[in-house]
Image (cartoon, rainbow, N blue to C red):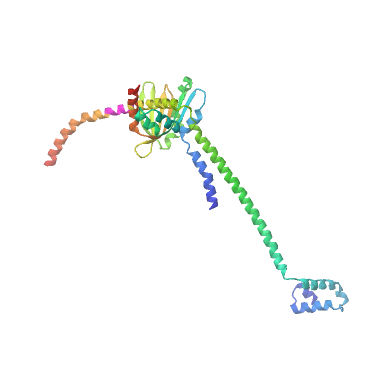
């Protein structure tokens, strides 16, 4: 039976018999070494209290929240670094974009004169470009009499 | 969801950086270099200036709607001989983007002026670029709302007033 107990195949009843056997002081000599063991088990089962499960649960929960808060802290750190990087990059880009428009002149009047000069140049070139186009207009005008002649011919054909 | 937002916030500035136009690159490259002259006039200053002088209506009309004028000129004759802003723009892929259309090319003695414009879809230009090649190597960039009708009027006004 003892062998079966250690194999873990005994029933509850048999366990009980064994325990009471070792509790009684009539243990056979060859089994004496087990007395303490069984008494210990008896003691353990006696002081076994219900809140051990709670304690274990508490322990697990505590561990989990610790882990979670650790992850959260890591997430916040990464997000913070990413956000500050974005802000820095944005700032640099904004500065770069604004730079080309740093004014050369402080005085609006000087700037105005320069701008006018520039526009005058642009305008002059623009007009001389357009002037080239006016040749096409002349060509158009030259073709007009021909068109008018064709019109009467067309009308004649339409009526027929 | 959070990841998507994060990715967008990272990509957005990069996209902005990618949009830097070929003209901007040229201005940045040659600004304050020896042999070059750069002139920047901001829209704010132009607006202020246009209020001061009311005699030239077409000019003021145009100036008040501009957001900026930038001019890049090659002063050094030696550099001018080697450098062609048109070629430079071409190298930067300026003509691949299809943003600008070539309005016209005016060829005169020792000078070729190319008009490039970005349409704003309302019969006006949102950006006008003049590439002057030849003896006077110059790049002029005018941004803002530009009415093509006004451009022609300006030189007539100038002739009266000068």
User: At which x and y percent is residue A3?
Assistant: 79, 74
Whether residue A139 can be seen here: yes
Q: Does the magenta stretch include residue A132?
A: yes
**In the image, A61: left or right of B139?**
right
Q: Which quarter of the picture shows residue B134? A: top left
Closest to the observer, B3 or B155: B155
Q: In this view, does B126 lie above or below A19?
A: above
Q: In this view, does A77 lie above or below B38?
A: below
Look at 13% across and 39% down and name the residue there: A157
User: At which x and y percent is residue A78?
Assistant: 61, 48
User: At which x and y percent is residue A134?
Assistant: 28, 28
Q: Which quarter of the picture shows residue A153? A: top left
Whether residue B92 can be seen here: no
Direction top: furthest residue: B77
Total residue callouts: 0
Look at 27% across and 29% down and name the residue there: A136
Q: In this view, does B81 lie above or below B122?
A: above
Closest to the observer, A8 or B139: B139
Closest to the observer, A43 or B157: B157
Q: Is residue A78 magenta?
A: no
**In the image, B28: left or right of A126?**
right
Closest to the observer, A66 or B162: B162
Direction left: furthest residue: A160
User: In which quadrant will I find the C terminus of chain B?
Assistant: top left
Which residues lie in the magenta part?
A128-135
**In the image, B84: left or right of A20?**
left
Direction right: furthest residue: A29
Look at 43% across and 36% down and name the residue there: B96
Q: Is the magenta stretch mostly helix, strand or loop?
A: helix
User: At which x and y percent is residue B68?
Assistant: 44, 32
């Amino acid at each position: 039976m003892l062998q079966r107990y250690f194999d873990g195949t005994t029933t509850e009843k048999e366990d009980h018999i064994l325990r009471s056997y070792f509790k009684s002081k009539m243990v056979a000599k060859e089994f004496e070494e087990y007395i303490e063991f069984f008494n210990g088990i008896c003691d353990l089962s006696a002081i076994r209290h219900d809140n051990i499960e709670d304690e274990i649960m508490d322990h697990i929960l505590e561990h989990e929240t610790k882990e979670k808060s650790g992850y959260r802290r890591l997430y916040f750190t990464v997000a913070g670094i990413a956000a500050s990087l974005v802000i820095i990059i944005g700032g640099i880009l904004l500065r770069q974009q604004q730079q080309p428009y740093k004014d050369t002149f402080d005085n609006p009047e000087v700037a105005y004169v320069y701008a006018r000069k520039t526009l005058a140049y642009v305008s002059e070139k623009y007009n001389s470009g357009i002037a080239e186009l006016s040749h096409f207009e002349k060509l158009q005008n030259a073709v007009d009499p021909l068109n008018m002649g064709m019109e009467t011919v067309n009308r004649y054909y339409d009526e027929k | 969801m959070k990841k998507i937002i994060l990715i967008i916030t990272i990509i957005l500035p990069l996209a902005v950086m990618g949009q830097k136009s070929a003209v901007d690159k040229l201005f940045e490259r040659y600004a304050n270099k020896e042999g070059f002259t750069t002139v920047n006039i901001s829209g704010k200053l132009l607006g202020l200036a246009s209020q001061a002088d009311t005699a030239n209506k077409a000019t003021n009309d145009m100036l008040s709607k501009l957001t900026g004028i930038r001019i890049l000129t090659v002063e050094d004759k030696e550099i001018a001989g080697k450098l062609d802003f048109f070629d430079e723009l071409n190298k930067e892929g300026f003509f691949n983007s299809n943003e600008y259309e070539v309005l016209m090319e005016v060829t005169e003695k020792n000078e070729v002026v190319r008009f490039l414009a970005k349409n704003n879809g309302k019969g006006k230009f949102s950006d006008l670029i003049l590439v002057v090649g030849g003896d006077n190597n110059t790049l002029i960039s005018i941004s803002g709302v530009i009415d093509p009708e006004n451009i022609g009027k300006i030189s007539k006004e100038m002739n009266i007033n000068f």
